[in-house]
Image (spheres, coloured by chain):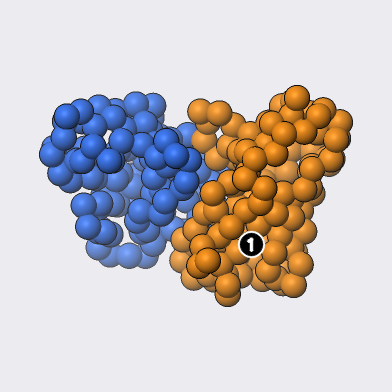
Amino acid sequence: AQKITQTQPGMFVQEKEAVTLDCTYDTSDPSYGLFWYKQPSSGEMIFLIYQGSYDQQNATEGRYSLNFQKARKSANLVISASQLGDSAMYFCAMGVNTGGFKTIFGAGTRLFVKA
Amino acid sequence: GAGVSQSPSNKVTEKGKDVELRCDPISGHTALYWYRQSLGQGLEFLIYFQGNSAPDKSGLPSDRFSAERTGGSVSTLTIQRTQQEDSAVYLCATGAAGDGTQYFGPGTRLTVL
């Protein structure tokens, strides 16, 4: 069975500092994708970054990078130079390639950026 | 517009009534997902359509829930005989048949009185 675990219900970070949001996953399928989504208080879900299970390098998208450690089954999100607008819920998700991608989501981490 | 759209944005209904929630996907996206998000909670997978394949209904919480996707495009999620515990935001997401990245609609907030 697939499982996504986010152990940090809430995190605080000082503006302009970096923060790491933890995510571990479990699957026996060799082909999968890992995703991070941001959900501001307005409610929309915003795609941030994707990492494929066969990708050799860690994914990066602007200030977001995904620290992919396959042996540990972890896919932590690193946000550099935090901004006040980064305050939101962050969800880690995993899609398993079964001819499409059925996706499961973690419980989320609420990030608070302090001025 | 170019994004996923959902209607209605808000729906208030009485317990026992049926409701239909609509999702218009991004053109060309073959994958379509429905999720439910209760207040302060994560996303609960409901159902997943991929092209012309049989949908994955494994997340539907009861037989009061059903969904259709007509012509591989618009999808409707139907909840029959609504209960108060059905109150939540229902999110639709679509994706191209690639890496599984999903693009979400704004959601429908359902309130069952």
Disc 1: which chain?
B
Position of residue B35 relative to residue A101, above or below, is above
Which sits in the foreground, A10 or A22?
A10
Find residue B90 and report its horizontal and vertical position in percent: 63, 43
Q: Which residue bears the numbered disc 1?
A: B24
What is the drawing colour of chain B? orange
Tell me where residue A55 appears, x and y as whole percent: 32, 65
Q: Position of residue A8 (x, y in %)?
A: 35, 28
Q: Is residue B108 left or right of residue B104?
A: right
Residue at 59% over, 31% down:
B38
Q: Is residue A28 visible?
A: no
Q: Quadrant of residue B52?
A: bottom right
Q: Is residue A35 left or right of residue B27?
A: left
Q: Residues within 10 Å of mark 1 (few under 14, many from 20)?
A: many
In the rendered image, residue B85, in percent from the top left (x then y), is placed at 71, 27
Q: Which chain is blue?
A: A
| Camera-side residue of A22 and A42 | A42
Q: Is residue A16 above or below residue A27?
A: above
Q: Quadrant of residue A10?
A: top left
Residue kind at label 1, given as amino acid type: Asp
Label 1 sits on a secondary structure element that is strand
Residue shown at the point (40%, 40%) measured from the top left: A40
Kindly give the residue lying farthest to the bottom in the view shown. B28
Q: Residue at x 16, y 35 (%)?
A: A15
Counting labels gives: 1
The residue at 79%/43% (across/down) is: B19
> Is A109 situated left or right of B65 in this image?
left
Viewport quadrant of the C terminus of chain B: top right
Foreground: A21 or B93? Answer: B93
Left or right, B73 with respect to A71, comes to right
